[in-house]
Amino acid sequence: MAQAPLYIDNLQYANWSPDLFDEMAQAHLAAVHVTICYHENFRQTVENMISWNRYIEAHPNRLMFGRTGDDVRAAHASGRTAIFYGFQNCAPMEDDIGLIEILHQLGGRFMQLTYNNQSLLATGCYEAEDSGLTRFGRQAIKEMNRVGLVIDMSHSAERSSLEAIEASERPISITHANPDWWHPARRNKSHALIEALTQSGGMIGFSLYPHHLKDGSDCTLESFCQMIADAAERYGVSALGIGSDLCQNQPDSVVEWMRNGRWSRETDFGEGSAANPGFPDQPAWFQGIRDFPNLAKGLRDIGFAQEEVDAIMGGNWLGFYDRNFGGQS
Amino acid sequence: MAQAPLYIDNLQYANWSPDLFDEMAQAHLAAVHVTICYHENFRQTVENMISWNRYIEAHPNRLMFGRTGDDVRAAHASGRTAIFYGFQNCAPMEDDIGLIEILHQLGGRFMQLTYNNQSLLATGCYEAEDSGLTRFGRQAIKEMNRVGLVIDMSHSAERSSLEAIEASERPISITHANPDWWHPARRNKSHALIEALTQSGGMIGFSLYPHHLKDGSDCTLESFCQMIADAAERYGVSALGIGSDLCQNQPDSVVEWMRNGRWSRETDFGEGSAANPGFPDQPAWFQGIRDFPNLAKGLRDIGFAQEEVDAIMGGNWLGFYDRNFGGQS
């Protein structure tokens, strides 16, 4: 019997429930990087971690803690999913550099330096101007490098992202975004940025969020996979993975929270609009977690070799986890 | 018998104790704007407010709450000091625009948008680049205008300060700084900025912190008062006041905390240096609160009329309080 595939989804924020844990197993997801918080402060983030700790405890046949690459292998060997915690903003570290190590000790493995807006560390992609890394940002990067909390610049502005790549002694990530040469969007990334990212050992996870897709909800699987093939030409297969950005079963109030947090008294529609404020419809071929294997089929159909498919669908992130989740040696 | 003078010190962060409350009364301080926090978050700021509430409760013959200009008049009439709460950073509002009204309800009357570093709202004067107001910053200013929490840009960078003046529908303040044309220092302000501030109804409080003074601790009273006379020529008497920045009786660990908060694992010396890390010595003629009347004498000696001295020493801030501490009409 052939071994089951080992897939990794390096970004999800679903409305978690037992049926989704079943879907993860059926979709061969040996690891999922789950978003623990957007705007939550440290204490609120800890509360969200407690909720996840309870899920893992309650579903021992489906889930296990993810802390290292070997946890992914153990999950794969036992048909489970290793859950890795990540933060889409630096809000949980508040203004306290000491919280970086604490968040890592509690299981955090990825942290975005910004979420759309200016943060204490860097500039988000929705600000009018991007002044790059702040004084605090440069110190936070050193500390994140030291403990093995991976920098994620998915929602950051270009200059801040380039400066983070340069300032970081370890590879960084863009866990969920696409190239803007495929689909121009404020959240998608330039060739120059993806090149700098991947040449320094960093990785990009391709996003299935319709606002990041060419033709939005009508994007085809072929177009998505051809984009990955083109990216492989430019950056090499080994720097590519998936970060679906799936928000499965979330009500529209959640996307409003993501966009507005507690900072706004007016409604910010982010990538949506007043006429289209909610979550966009997923494309037919990627409705949710259970469609993850469709991506593998699409990649094979576009001409990738099986080992390349395996790398993009999970192997590359696994290697990245191995190299970057431990303390600095 | 001549009525006692009415003086206002619009910025202090002393190591508060009953003897300092006595000094306030002896120095004719009818109002002091006291710094409630630097890097403290909301909950910690509330704790600091509780400490001050207890002081006021325990010293009814010396202190009273300050919420409006009339409270200053009541304090003056009864020989007491009205205490106004202010924040040297936006840390107490965290990332929550709703906390602006809460902080005002609890007595907050001034809030700096930044303290040296980049904040969620604007850029501090120690950052390499100043990108101006952030998206959140523009919304926070509207809300501060609405409730009557005065913007203070003392520790902010130039462009951010100019943008705050332009974005704010109400006058803003620089509570404690001096002109850089008198003493070039990173914390002192340009002519263009002070001009824009004062032409829009804003006020500057002149600082007695030695790093802001020409010749530092050796600055003379004459030089300080001549600077005020020159400022009166440029900006008019009515926009000028005092914000002494006195940190009386504070140990050097406090200035280290101010500069480094929780954001730094290296030591930032701010306006000091490794060789001179602590609080600098106050000039001989302004050792502390009790020397406040010396300023009035210095202003008279430099040629100000008595009503001008009264305005600079307290009357101007009092009028500013009257106009700016209430909700937007």
Image: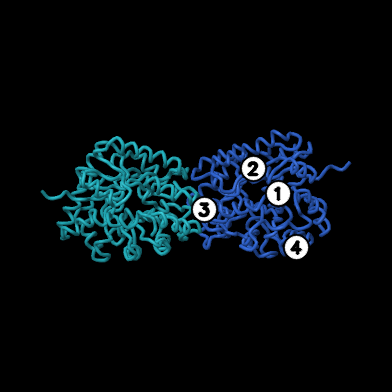
Chain colours: A cyan, B blue
Q: Would residue A232 be found to the left or right of residue A163 on screen?
A: left
Q: Are marks 3 and 2 in contact (CB under 8 Å)?
A: no
- Between A178 and A270, the residue placed more toward the observer is A178
Q: Mark 4: few, some, or many residues within 10 Å (few <14, many ≥20)?
A: some
Determine the CA span between mark 3 and mark 4.
33 Å
- Left or right: where does residue A141 sit relative to residue A175? right
Chain to which mark 4 belongs: B
Q: Is residue A329 left or right of residue A218?
A: right
Label annotation for residue B218: 4
Name the one closer to the observer, B283 or A274: B283
The residue carrying mark 2 is B85
The amino acid pointed to by label 2 is Tyr
Pinpoint residue B111: horizontal percent, then vertical percent: 59, 47
Mark 2 and mark 4 lie on one chain; the one further toward the N terminus is 2
Point out the tag, 3 or 1, that comes first from the N-terminus. Answer: 1
Secondary structure found at label 3: loop
Which numbered circle lies on residue B249?
1
Q: Position of residue A122 (x, y in %)?
A: 45, 56
> Considering the numbered disc 2 on the image, is that residue within a helix, a strand or a loop?
strand
Q: Residue shown at 49%/45% (left/top)?
A: B95
Distance (Cα) linking label 1 and label 4: 20 Å
- The earlier-in-sequence mark between 1 and 4 is 4
Q: Which numbered disc covers residue B263? A: 3
Q: Amino acid at mark 3?
A: Trp
Q: Quadrant of the C terminus of chain B?
A: top right
User: Same chain for the residues at labels 3 and 1, yes or no?
Assistant: yes
**Looking at the image, is mark 3 or mark 4 earlier in the sequence?**
4
Front position in the image: A10 or B128: A10
